[in-house]
Image: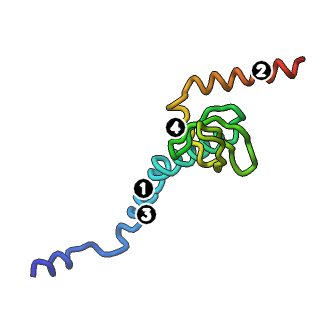
Amino acid sequence: MNLLSIFLQAPAPGGNSSMMLIMMGVMFVGFYFLMIRPQMRKQKQEKNFQETLKVGTRVVLTSGLHGRIAQVQDDGFVIETLSGKLKFEKAAVSREFTEARFGDKAKAAEKAGDKKEIETEKK
């Protein structure tokens, strides 16, 4: 009996449909700005990082392997490690792990490499 009275007191459908649509829209916008947009920005930074890597840069792969880029190819990198040279996909290089491990050293080495290139171009 109690359940029947609750059902009969429910508002008619369609009365709050516009309010429900507005709430759904607000939720979608919130999800976009809190989840989707930051993830897209992170993916863009990761791809940009992988595209700008040069020979001689020290990197850390997503698997945790440390090495130095020996060769840049269209589809990946040849990474020189203590055990030899191994080929990996570009997506295997982690910007987050590399910056955490090498941080300023990797950036300084990259800047020094750029300076050397500029000096050799001037000669």
Q: Mark 4 points at which residue?
A: 97
Image depth: mark 3 or mark 2 in front: 2
* Residue 98 % position (x, y): 55, 35
Q: Which residue is drawn at 82% across and 18% down?
A: 119
Q: Circles 1 and 4: CB distance less than 8 Å?
A: no
Q: Determine whether the residue tagged by mark 1 lies in a helix, strand or loop.
A: helix
Report the number of discs: 4
Q: Name the residue under label 2.
A: 116
Q: Circles 4 and 3: CB distance less than 8 Å?
A: no
What's the mark number on residue 35?
A: none
Q: Which amino acid does label 1 sit on?
A: Met
Judge whether 65 appears above or below 6 on screen.
above
Q: Earlier in the sequence, mark 4 or mark 3?
A: 3
Q: Residue at x 51, y 46 (%)?
A: 63
* Residue 41 % position (x, y): 57, 44
Q: Earlier in the sequence, mark 1 or mark 3?
A: 3
Q: Circles 2 and 1: CB distance less than 8 Å?
A: no
Q: Which of marks 4 and 2 is nearer the N terminus?
A: 4
Q: Circles 4 and 2: CB distance less than 8 Å?
A: no
Image depth: mark 1 or mark 4 in front: 4
In this rendering, position of residue 20 left or right of residue 119: left
Judge whether 23 appears above or below 107 on screen.
below
Judge whether 103 appears above or below 78 on screen.
above
Q: What residue type is labelled 2?
A: Lys
Q: Which of marks 1 and 4 is nearer the N terminus?
A: 1
Colour mode?
A: rainbow
Q: Mark 1 points at which residue?
A: 27
Q: Name the residue under label 3.
A: 21
- For mark 4, does the 10 Å Cα neighbourhood hold few (<14), some (14 to 19), or many (20 or more) residues? some
Q: Gap between marks 4 and 2, in whole Å?
A: 26 Å
Q: Gap between marks 3 and 2, in whole Å?
A: 60 Å
Q: What residue type is labelled 3?
A: Leu
